[in-house]
Image (spheres, rainbow, N blue to C red):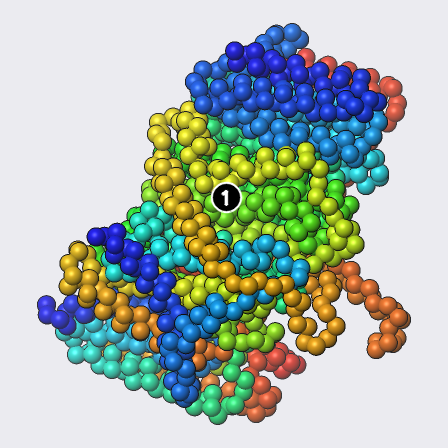
Amino acid sequence: MINTAFYIFFALLSVIPLVAWLLHRRSRWLWLPAMLLVVGLVAGAAAAGHGVWGSNQPVPSFSWNFPFPFALSIDRLSAFFLFLICAISIPIAIFSLSYVNGHYQGPRRAWIWTLLPLFILSMSVVVTASTALAFLFGWELMTLLSAGLILVEGTSEERLHNVFIYLLMMHASAAAVAAAFFLFWPHSPGLEFASIRSSAPALGPAIRTVVFLLAFVGFGTKAGIIPFHLWLPRAHPIAPSPVSALMSGVMLKTAIYGLVRFAFDFLGGGPPWSGYLVLAAGAVSGLLGVLYAIAEHDLKRLLAYHSVENIGIIYLGLGSSLLFLANGAPQWASLALIAALLHTLNHALFKSLLFLGAGAISHSTHTLDLEEHGGLLKRMPVTGTAFLIGCCSIVGLPLFNGFISEWLTFRSFLGGSLLANATAQVVLPLMIGVLALIGGLAAACFAKVYGVAFLGRPRSAEAEHAEETPLAMRTGLVLLALPCVVLGVLPSLALSPLARLAQVLVPGSSVPEEISSISRVIPWVAATLLGTIVVTFAIRRAQRFTATWACGLPPLTSRMQYTSTAFSKPIRSVFAAVYRPDRKVEVLPADQPYFPASISYRSERTTSYEKFLYRPAVDAIVAAAHQLRRLQTGNIQIYLLYIFLTLVSLLVYLRFLR
Amino acid sequence: MGIVGIAAGKVLSSSSVFLFLTVLLLVAARRISTSVLLFSLQSAAITAQVAVTAYYEQSVEAYAIAALVLSIKVIGIPYVFFRLIDGLKTPRDVKASTTPAQSVFIAVAMIFISYAAVRSYAQDVSVPGDTLAASVSLILTGAFLMVSRKKALMQMIGLLVMENGIFLAALATTFGMPLVIEIGIFFDVVMGVLLMGIFTFRIRDTFEHLDVSKLRRLRG
Amino acid sequence: MTMAIDVFQALLLILAAPLVRGIVARIKAGIQGRRGASIWRPYADVLKMFRKEDLAPPSASAVFRFAPRLLFAVAVAVAAFVPVLQPSALLGSLGDFIVMVYLMALGRFFLALGGMDGGSAFGGMGASREALVSTLAEAPFLLSMAALSISAHSPRIADIVGWTLGQDFFDISAVHILAFASMGMVALAESGRMPVDNPTTHLELTMIHEAMVLEYSGPSLALIEWASAIKLNVMLALLIALFGPWGMATHLAPVALGSAFGVYLLKMLLLMTALAVIESSVAKLRMYLVPDFLGVATATSVLAIIFTVLSRR
């Protein structure tokens, strides 16, 4: 039964490219690929749902051994992530129905409908793989297909450069992940997950450390934690909006899956310091991610930086879970893990929602620059309301889903004070301050985004004449916004399956009591708020719209509103040390300071990690390459000599040194 | 025990907390007069501690030291300082090279370090760890104040805070030094304050400011 | 019975809030050598504004009218978190301090949006400044509460208060003193008082909260004013409950409750006087010095957390 659903999912998604190419000239059948995609995804979600809510028995689906052991199966962890992928993709597919068909024609449209289902399929392969090679197969495919989707939008020089960086970093990440897998080879030749799991205790501590570090770097690059996030703000914004939603909302989560699979399932907790490492990565990514986001006024790039921030929050949860695990507190470890996994789900929901919202805005106003928006809520009420829900969720305000996961993370930090280890006792509670600062900055950032884009007066003619988006796009947005509220008010819907999952991953834990406590208090808070709001709306007085008094001057114009840049200025100047802006003021002509013909002001942010981390690394590699070039003389005899020397040295090694 | 005994116990258990608080406020203070006031309060906390020690030990010498501390550090030196500030008529801010927030974070770090440094030693020789940590952090903060404040007056205050720390350390480890030595130290401190007071007037008259960082121009 | 007292506590915090404002203003006037308005004046203001018509700028959307209502609802919900007469509260026995702090953030977020919805320069300016202050106030607020909850072994406010009640007043720990210093500074910032914000100013250089609500009028403004009065009242009551709960009724006897009420009023009067003294003697900080002020609060709360470990031994 489950397998049938899973097969339907696979079959439908693989058949869509064919359909898309066959029908791409017939405008009457344009809805068919999207419909097939939705049906396939529903089947996939159903197959995964069994693993999420049902038994924990892994359900093997595909398996063949030629040319390499390739097998897919759904256990509880896979099921959660497969469910996430399928469920989030459904609204995105519905949104794409009108977005893709409205924005692209001819072969481009067919290309999108070819790559999109395959991209989703490749992510499903990653999370359901039960052999290392199947995992790596899906992992590489996922990168390539998403790069393809970015290139459908255009092939300008800058775009190619960004895609190149994306591919480069992804291959480095894949190499690290592959190396992490292959270190298990001596103990489990087939590299099936089951045998990897059972062979993990046999690894020496040094090898375990290396495996953990490789997985941390490999998956960290994919997840976009700082300093490996270089590709993220470059690749995500330039993709078509539904693809951005998939990349940020769903694809990043495969990296979380990988890290959880390695750190919890395979290794059963890393080395003792691993928790601190992950916590530090999370804190740095969270803080810097949100600080960079505030300074942006390109909506999609801003959202991309917020992905870095949210991955940071997830890492904070994972890190504290690892720390608890290393200190023998499985109960708290499971709470922190639940927090991290719930935030994974929540981030998938609201980040997809926000990226789709960005798509809807650019559909209506043809720009992603916040300074050109304004007053959109009155013109696009459904999109505006859905976007507002997304903003509240990502900020982590109560009654929205982001709050639940942040609350659980806070509580797990508080639990750190009960550990025996003095360092952990201080470090974990101090993380409360870090997470609070991240939350506060995120609130400031989204107050800016929503206030500038959707409220006030329109700041451009495009925004003035913006219209509500088509039905399919609105449906997609609403379908993503609803669960944000539902999970925010009734968190137990998501928490009880996650608690069961955490019990599998953290042996010896039971369901934390915090879960029931938050599920009890939130409905009361919601009732209090709703009740009071209803009462206050009952006090009705005459309402009148009238122009604001402008001190007797001509009426206010949209240019007098605070801009996005102005809004973030106080925060940017407080955290100036992070930005290190490179400011240049040019006054022309220079000899007349009081009557200049023109003044130009340019402020550029070269981020510190680029200057201090990547630049030296790249320079070192280039220098090393120059040295290596000496080996490449172009003389055939020399190459033969290399081969000869290698052979001889191998023989010597075999004979004498072994 | 009686009510005095209970009060004495409470003073001992809470005085280091008050000392930490004065340390935090001292590095956050923006004005010289606030710093002087805080120094006076800090010395008052130390006086209370000496008095309590005297009560426990029933030693007249210790009472004498408490009276000395009270008269010199809580009343005398602050009075001299306020006179100086009035007489100098320079701007009232401390001219710090770090912002208050940074200074407080540094002070927090120093308190943490002093706790960590003192912990094992305090357990070995069984002296009150809190008091010892407080004294070490007073010394560190005094040094920090001298390093980071540019006004000459603030460097005097930094020195006095350091002296407070050393005094407290002696009190915590050996229940204070002999009376003669204490009197000698106090004499030194008073002379130091008076001398520096005269010097600051000289500096002000010659350069019309008290910014120590600008004295670099005196180099040949 | 407990329930009834909990309801009474919440109502007290909500309904007496304008009075607290009035009394603080009166004490301030006294300190500054003025006669000052009646302490009942804030009630008259709120009532007057409720009777007026509700004006909105033409650019305003639904958010503009929704924000004050939500802000008020949040204030009501937050009032239900704070124990006053006994160590329990309607929501404070269920929910913890994190929920409370984040509820406040919910109200602020929407008020900032409402400010920007007005479409004038002032709303955006106020929202931007408020965003800065609240961003930086959140960390010390949560950290100092966390330090207390670590000492009390429970994150629920009612439990923290109950635990503190069981302690000896003279056994003040470093954690409590540091957390009190930090919370005091946060309370000033959160309720928009000096030296962070001047509640009586309308100068564009200095105003934060007032700039944000400049476009509001009528019932909307009444709700905003009432909500910020509740917030001030709640912050003061929270300081009392967390750091000086002694005198609260530990059992349900009329005498105990009556004396708890009397003691509460005394403590409240003391805090209000302290607030008035601070506001009359301290100059408002320049906008860009506010981060320093809150930075000091953060450092103090960090030290409080460190001391939860150091003082355990």
> Residue A303 occupies which quadrant of the picture?
top right
| In this rendering, position of residue A613 left or right of residue B112 | right
Q: Residue at x 31, y 70 (%)?
A: C268
Q: Amino acid at mark 1?
A: Phe
What secondary structure is found at the residue carrying circle 1? Answer: loop
In the displayed structure image, the side of residue A69 where residue B66 appears, left or right: left
**Relative height, residue C253 to residue A22 (above, below):** below
Q: Chain of mark 1?
A: A
Residue nearest the observer in this picture, B52 or C153? C153
Residue at left offset 53%, top offset 73%: C285
Q: Residue at x 76, y 27 (%)?
A: A112
**Residue B20 vs residue B154, the one in the foreground:** B20
Residue at left offset 80%, top offset 19%: A23
Residue A582, visible in the rendered structure: yes
Q: Which of the 4 image quadrants contains residue C215?
A: bottom right
Q: Nearer the viewer, residue A656 or A132?
A: A132
Residue A292's x, y, as percent? 64, 51
The x, y position of residue B190, in whole percent, is 37, 85
In x, y percent, where is residue B44? 30, 77
As displayed, is residue A203 above or below residue A612?
above
Q: Is residue C266 above or below residue A33?
A: below
User: Which residue has dot 1 on it?
Assistant: A400
Q: Residue furthest left?
A: B1
Percent from the top left, x then y, of residue B123? 27, 53
Does the image show residue A215? no
CA neighbours of label 1 inside 10 A, class few (<14), some (14 to 19), many (20+): many
| Left or right: A485 as drawn, with respect to A174 | left
